[in-house]
Image (spheres, rainbow, N blue to C red):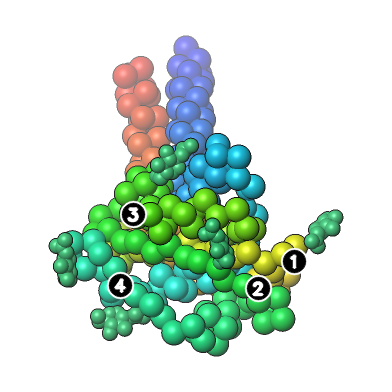
C-alpha cells in the first residue's frame, strides 16, 4: 500500500514536471529572440505583397544592435528618437565591435529606428514603433533590398527604454557581413540581434532563471503535498 502510494506520487510528480518543462519550452520558443520574430514579421509583410524575402544576416543584425546601443540615451519621454551616428561608425566602430570581417562589409541601404519606454511585443513594435511614416513604409517595400538585420536593446534591470533597430542592405553578393570565428563574431554584452543563438536582454534571462527556481520549488512542494495527502 505504502509502496503503491509512493509510486503514485512519483508518477504525479513526473507528469507535472513534464507539463511544466513543455510549458517552459513553449515559453522559451515564443520569447527566445524577439529580433528573429520581428524579422519574420518583416518578411511576412513583404511576401504578402509579392516582394522578395530578405536574407537573414547575423552580421547585419549585430550592426543593428550596435547602432541601437549607440542611441541608447536618445529616447525621449514621449517615445521619439533622433539619432544619427556618423557614417564612418559603421565600418570603424560597429563592424569591429561585432567581429564583422571588413572585406565582407556590404552596402547599407537604409534603416529604421524607434523606441518605447515600455516593452512591446514584436508585432506591435513593427506597426507602432518602426513603421511610423511614408519614408519607413517605402523602405519596407523597396524591391532592391536583399538582406536584413534586427537589433534590440533595453534598459538595465528589465526597464525601458527599449530601442528597436532594423538595418537593410542591397548587396548583391550572397554572403555579406560575415562574422569572424566561423560566424560566432564577438559576443555582445547587452541586447539581442537576429541570427544570434542567444536569447534577448538580460532582464528576460534573469526572469527566466527566477521562473525556473519557482518551478523547481513548486515541484518539490507538490511531491510533499502528494505524500502528505496520502498520509505517509
Ligand atoms: C517629444 O519630445 C521632444 C523632445 O523631448 C520634443 O521636441 C517634441 O516636441 C515632443 N513631441 C511631442 C509630440 O510631444
Ligand atoms: C543623441 O542625442 C544627443 C542630444 O540630443 C545628441 O547630441 C547626439 O548627437 C545624439 N547621438 C547620436 C548618435 O545622434
Ligand atoms: C530602393 O533602395 C535603393 C538603395 O538604397 C535606392 O537606390 C532606391 O531609390 C530605392 N527605391 C525606391 C523605390 O525607394
Ligand atoms: C504591412 O505593414 C504595414 C505597416 O504596418 C501595414 O500597413 C500593411 O497592412 C502590412 N501588410 C500586410 C500584407 O500585412
Ligand atoms: C548565391 O549562392 C548560390 C548557392 O549558394 C549560387 O548558386 C548563386 O550563384 C549565388 N549568387 C550570387 C549572386 O553570388
Q: Is residue 154 above or below residue 138?
A: below
* Upstream in sequence: badge 4 or badge 2: 4
Real-space CA distance between mark 3 and mark 4, rounded to the nearest whole angstrom: 13 Å
* Discs 1, 2 touching: Cβ within 8 Å: yes
The disc, 3 or 4, on the residue closer to the chain's N-terminal end is: 4
- Residue 84 spot, x, y in % from top left: 38, 77
The part of the image, by quadrant, that contains residue 219 is top left
Q: Quadrant of ligand 2?
A: bottom left
Q: Residue at x 41, y 70 (%)?
A: 68
Nearer to us of marks 2 and 3 is 3
What's the residue at 35%, 17% (across, down)? 230
Question: Picture quarter containing residue 105?
Answer: bottom right
Mark 1 → mark 3, Cα distance in angstroms: 30 Å
Task: Label 1, secondary structure: give it.
Answer: loop
Per the image, the residue denoted by label 2 is: 106
Give me the C-alpha separation between circle 4 and circle 1.
32 Å
Q: Residues within 10 Å of mark 1 (few under 14, many from 20)?
A: few
> Which tag, 1 or 2, sits closer to the chain's start?
2
Residue topped by disc 1: 173
The answer to which of 30 and 115 lies nearer the viewer is: 115
Badge 2 element:
loop
Residue 212 position, x and y percent, is 41, 46
How far is mark 4 from mark 2, CA to CA? 25 Å
* Element under disc 3: loop
How far apart in space, not on screen, are marks 2 and 3 (Cα)? 26 Å
Instruction: Pick whichever of labels 4 and 1 is earlier in the sequence.
Output: 4
Q: Label 1 CB, ligand 5: below 8 Å?
A: yes
Q: Which label belongs to residue 82?
A: 4
- When asked about the image quadrant of residue 184, the answer is bottom right
Provide residue 53's location: percent of width, then percent of height: 63, 48
Of the pair 45 and 222, the residue shown nearer to us = 45
Q: Is mark 4 within 8 Å of ligand 2?
A: yes
Amino acid at each position: 500500500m505504502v509502496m503503491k502510494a509512493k509510486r503514485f506520487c512519483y508518477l504525479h510528480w513526473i507528469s507535472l514536471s513534464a507539463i511544466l518543462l513543455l510549458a517552459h519550452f513553449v515559453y522559451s520558443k515564443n520569447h527566445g529572440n524577439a529580433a528573429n520574430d520581428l524579422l519574420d514579421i518583416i518578411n511576412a509583410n513583404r511576401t504578402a505583397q509579392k516582394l522578395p524575402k530578405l536574407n537573414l544576416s547575423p552580421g547585419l543584425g549585430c550592426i543593428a544592435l550596435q547602432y541601437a546601443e549607440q542611441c541608447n540615451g536618445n529616447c525621449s519621454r514621449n517615445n521619439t528618437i533622433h539619432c544619427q551616428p556618423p557614417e564612418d561608425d559603421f565600418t570603424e566602430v560597429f563592424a569591429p565591435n561585432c567581429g564583422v570581417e571588413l572585406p565582407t562589409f556590404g552596402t547599407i541601404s537604409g534603416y529604421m529606428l524607434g523606441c518605447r519606454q515600455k516593452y512591446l511585443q514584436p508585432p506591435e513594435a513593427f506597426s507602432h514603433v518602426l513603421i511610423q511614416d511614408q519614408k519607413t513604409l517605402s523602405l519596407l517595400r523597396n524591391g532592391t533590398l536583399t538582406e536584413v538585420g534586427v537589433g534590440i536593446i533595453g534598459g538595465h534591470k528589465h526597464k525601458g527604454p527599449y530601442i528597436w533597430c532594423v538595418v537593410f542592405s542591397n548587396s548583391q553578393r550572397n554572403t555579406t557581413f560575415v562574422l569572424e570565428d566561423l560566424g560566432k563574431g564577438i559576443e555582445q554584452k547587452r541586447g539581442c540581434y537576429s541570427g544570434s543563438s542567444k536569447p534577448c536582454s538580460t532582464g528576460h534571462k534573469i526572469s527566466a532563471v527566477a521562473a525556473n527556481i519557482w518551478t523547481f520549488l513548486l515541484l518539490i512542494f507538490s511531491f510533499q503535498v502528494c505524500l502528505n495527502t496520502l498520509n505517509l
